[in-house]
Image (cartoon, grey):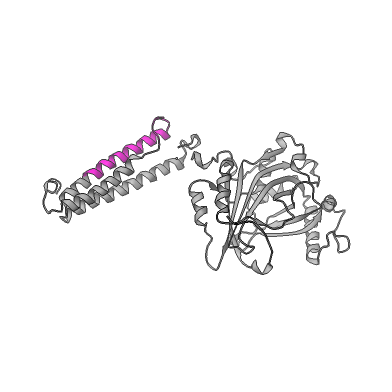
Amino acid sequence: MASGFTAKKNADTQDFTRKTTKYWVHCDDIPELKSTIMTHLPPYNFSTKITNMVQSLYCDNERLKKYNDRIMMINGGMLFRYRWYGNGVPKIGFMEQKIRRFGWLNGKTVKRRFKLRVCDGERYMSGDYVPTADNAEPPLGPAALALSREIQAYLRHENLVPMVRTAYNRSAYQKSFSSPIRISFDENLQFSLVKNQKFFVSDPKDLHLEPHEYYDFAHGVLEIKVRLVGENRSYLPEWAQELFDRGVIMPSDKFSKYNSSIAILFNDRVNKIPYYLPLIEQFTPASTKIPLMDEDRGAPRSFMQLERTYLKWLRNMVAICMLGVALLGFQISDVAGGFTITASLLILLRVVYVYHCRLNEMRGKSQSFTFDDPYTPCLVTALFVSCIILQSIFNTDEGPFRTILI
């Protein structure tokens, strides 16, 4: 297992585009996920002075304009947050602006930020403190000063104030700063209200919140960033695809911590919620996914999956049956051909029987039949092997089966 190391940023290595995909990970599956990741990628630390806790204050107004813009997928929609790293109250954090631009409009999401002391935060929000080259601490360059004034003007014009806080522990995995694949994993995610809309920061455990003022997110959030080179599209590494196939990670495209926190904590004031929100409580560990869940009974996708399984079996049995017809038609082996045709039709009858048993179980008409079917695959394998053996032994041009079937 590779050991972790500290990042050394080089701006010259950042001239490429990355594709990001997001996934949920059930808390029961987190140990397996971390173990799998660390066999392929080492832990990555951006600084030896920063702990893995990330906290953010997100700004909006009483009409929740920023939230509604993001829910409506407005191109150019902005999001403002104050972010800091580590436990407790830091001296310095980052005031950030995110601008969403969609790929199909030849754009990409942009994030800009500058350093801002915690003690200056509330005065900055109210306009009483305007960063300049003389009073900014830490010192800001011309570009950062211009950004600070631009963000301040927008915050005051839209009456944006801190509304919600997010806090979580983040682990990063990659081989270098310019690594073709980057992975971040967030766990222990908590959303909470910012009381009285004041700009203050504190350790979440010291906030003394009421039960309705915070929400512990049930799952971990995995982000996989893959570098795009030329016309190559992003793809999951083989080990990640295997986790996806087994249900350890579940896609959560467009998942947003901010959107989720507003929709949950201000549920009485929002008219629209993220599409994925109802799925939070339904996502189950990978170990509980070979039997049918109660919430899946009667779901259209479950019936369609059942039909696709039946059609696959039907195609396979028709193909084997046609093999038997070929053995007869080309006078290769009457015995092998007749046996193959007869046995494939009998197995097809079993496939139909299993399909209807599963259908009745999904409709709630049967509780005794399980979805596990160990016999049909064995029968099909035995049929194919028997066909080969019989063809080798009885390789004749005439026989009793040929007289009956042709």
208 left or right, relative to 354: right
State left or right for residue 11 relative to residue 395: right
Q: Which residues are magenta?
A: 342-370
Quarter of the image with the N terminus in it: bottom right
Which percent across, then down, holds residue 75?
Answer: 64, 57
Q: How many marks?
A: 0
For the stretch drawn in magenta, the main secondary structure is helix
Tell me what residue is drawn at x 52 percent, y 62 percent.
233
385 or 164, nearer to the observer: 385
Residue 266 visible to the viewer = no
Kindly indicate the quadrant of the structure image that contains residue 17. Answer: bottom right
Query: Based on the displayed image, in which of its 4 quarters is residue 77 positioned?
Result: bottom right
Q: Is residue 351 located in the magenta-colored stretch of the structure?
A: yes
Image height check: is 105 above or below 260? below
How far from the left and from the top, in percent, is residue 157? 79, 54
Name the foreground residue: 34 vs 10.
34
